[in-house]
Image (cartoon, helix red, strand yellow):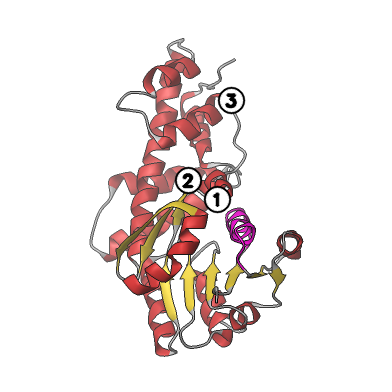
Amino acid sequence: MAERIGFVGLGIMGKPMAKNLVTSGYDVTVYNRSSASVDELVAASATAGISSADVASKSDIIVLMVPDSSDSEAVVLGEAGLLEGASAGDLIVDMSSIEPGVSQHIHDVCKEKGVKFIDAPVSGGEPMAVSGDLAIMVGGDSGNFERAQPLFEVMGKSAVLCGGSGAGNTTKLANQIIVGANIHALAEALTLATKAGVNPETVFNAIKGGLAGSNVMNAKAPMMFERNFAPGFRVELHYKDINNAAKTANELGLSLQVTANLQQVFKALIEWGEGGNDHSAILSYVEKLTGVTVTNK
């Protein structure tokens, strides 16, 4: 008998991920604080739950996709949370990007009640959530990883077991430092090109096949020179991840210069009212400092 799937958190990432599971034929029960996303999933053949606990009571594997550490703790451990409805042997797959230490704490509480837990944050933003091509980084027991693997194959193009509990989120923090640094460097490079009188789209086409080329460049450079900052991954969420990276580094006794710089960049963008824009809006930060506007026009 196929396992019943629960899904809690139908935001910009969670909704397309849950929809991919539904369209792949899984029996999916969903819950979200706002009803519009639930209604959309129900129209696609999902079942509506009335709470996180209700979803867990009707599922064998429950996927969670919420914004931050406190949200994961509340949804799993709080009143009417997943642990209230889950049975021993059920598996909670937290695909949220949160602090590794919080993942470890949730894992330990779940273990006491006989409920299995893995952290499995993702990279790829909304476009890859829609297409089912996310990169999934997993922390936890190998048996639980293998049990969730069929779901990962629907939602992502790759899933790697990175280590024990919390290792998935540690890996995600490393990912976010690299992505943020790439976007900032790309913004400065296109600003330099524009100021020198070279079309930024031409620069992009010239260098994307060389050593500087990357998935980040391919995704974000066109957004920059077309001035399209519609969110695939919001500045405010990247800021949250970078803050978690800085906090984790501090706990480990590390001083990370690029991470500290990204904190300041994202903080400034949020103070300027750009927290809801795509993180390619780091370009706005560079433009404000330089007085240069990047465009391919």
Identify the residue under disc 3.
226
**Residues tagged 3 and 1 counted as in contact (Cβ below 8 A):** no
Location of the C terminus by quadrant is top right
The Cα atoms of the two marked residues, 1 and 2, are separated by 23 Å
Magenta-colored stretch includes residue 23: yes
Decide which of 294, 172 is in the foreground and name it.
172
Q: Is residue 95 visible?
A: no
Left or right: residue 170 versus residue 134 is: left
The spot of residue 213 in percent (x, y) is 36, 29
Identify the residue under disc 1.
129
Amino acid type, callout 3? Glu
Left or right: residue 114 versus residue 229 is: left
The Cα atoms of the two marked residues, 2 and 3, are separated by 21 Å
Furthest residue to the left?
A: 253
The Cα atoms of the two marked residues, 3 and 1, are separated by 23 Å
Residue pictured at 62% horizontal, 62% vertical: 25
Q: In this view, does 111 lie above or below 194?
A: below
**Residues tagged 1 and 2 counted as in contact (Cβ below 8 A):** no
Q: Nearer the viewer, mark 1 or mark 2?
A: 1
Q: Is mark 1 on a helix, strand or loop?
A: helix
Amino acid type, callout 2? Phe
Decide which of 133, 127 is in the foreground and name it.
133
Decide which of 195, 237 is in the foreground and name it.
237
Crowding around mark 3 (Cα neighbors within 10 Å: few <14, some 14 to 19, many 20+) is some
Identify the residue under disc 2.
266
Left or right: residue 44 versus residue 15 is: right
Residue pictured at 38% horizontal, 68% vertical: 145
Looking at the rendered structure, which numbered label has been put on residue 233? none
Residue bounds of the magenta highlight: 10-26
Q: What element carries label 2?
A: helix
